[in-house]
Amino acid sequence: QVQLVESGGGLVQAGGSLRLSCAGSGSIAKINVMGWYRQAPGKQRELVATITSLGSTNYADSVKGRFTISRDNAKNTVYLQMNSLNTEDTAVYYCKLRNLGYEYWGQGTQVTVSS
C-alpha cells in the first residue's frame, strides 16, 4: 500500500515564498513519476509540475520561472519551491505518484496567497 503525506502549505503574502513537501511510503518502484497538482475553488484540478525519478521535469506555463520541483529518491519525497506567489496561486495543492501503472494522491495542502 502506498501513502503520500503532504506538508508545507499555509498563508503567505503576494510576492512571498512557500515550500511544499510530499513524502511517499509503501511499495514504491525506483522508476516512477511524482508531481504536484492544484485545485482552486470552482475550478478543475490542474497540473503544476511533474518530475520523473531520473529528474526530468515538466511545468505548467503559469508557474514556469517561479516554481521549482525537485525530489529525493532515497526518501521518496518530492518538493515544490514556490516563489513570487500571487493570488492566482491560491488553491489546494495535491501530490501525485504514478507507480507501477497506478496513481496515488495525497490528501492535499492549502496554499492561500493574500494581496
Image (tube, rainbow, N blue to C red):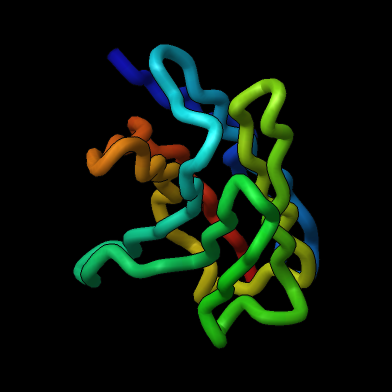
Q: Quadrant of residue 113?
A: bottom right
Question: Which residue appears at 72% of the width and 50% of the height?
Answer: 70
In which quarter of the view is residue 2 placed? top left
Q: Horizontal and vertical percent for residue 46?
A: 34, 69
Residue shown at 46% from the left, 38% from the top: 109
- State the residue in front, 52 or 7: 52
| Most foreground residue, 80 or 102 | 102
Q: Is residue 55 above or below residue 95?
A: below
Residue lying furthest bottom? 61
From this view, report whether residue 18 is shown above or below residue 21.
below
Q: Position of residue 55 (x, y in %)?
A: 69, 55
Looking at the rendering, which quadrant does residue 21 occupy? top right
Q: Is 88 located above or below residue 28 in the figure?
A: below
Number of marks drawn: 0
Q: Name the foreground residue: 55 vs 90.
A: 55
Image quadrant occupied by the N terminus = top left
| Residue located at (47% from left, 23% from top) | 5
Q: Residue at x 24, y 71 (%)?
A: 43
Which quadrant of the figure contains the C terminus?
A: bottom right
Compared across the picture, whether 40 is left or right of 85 comes to left
- Left or right for 28, reference 115: left
For this view, does 23 lie left or right of residue 74? left
Q: Nearer the viewer, residue 31 or 102?
A: 31
State the image coordinates of residue 79 (x, y, percent, origin top left). Answer: 67, 43
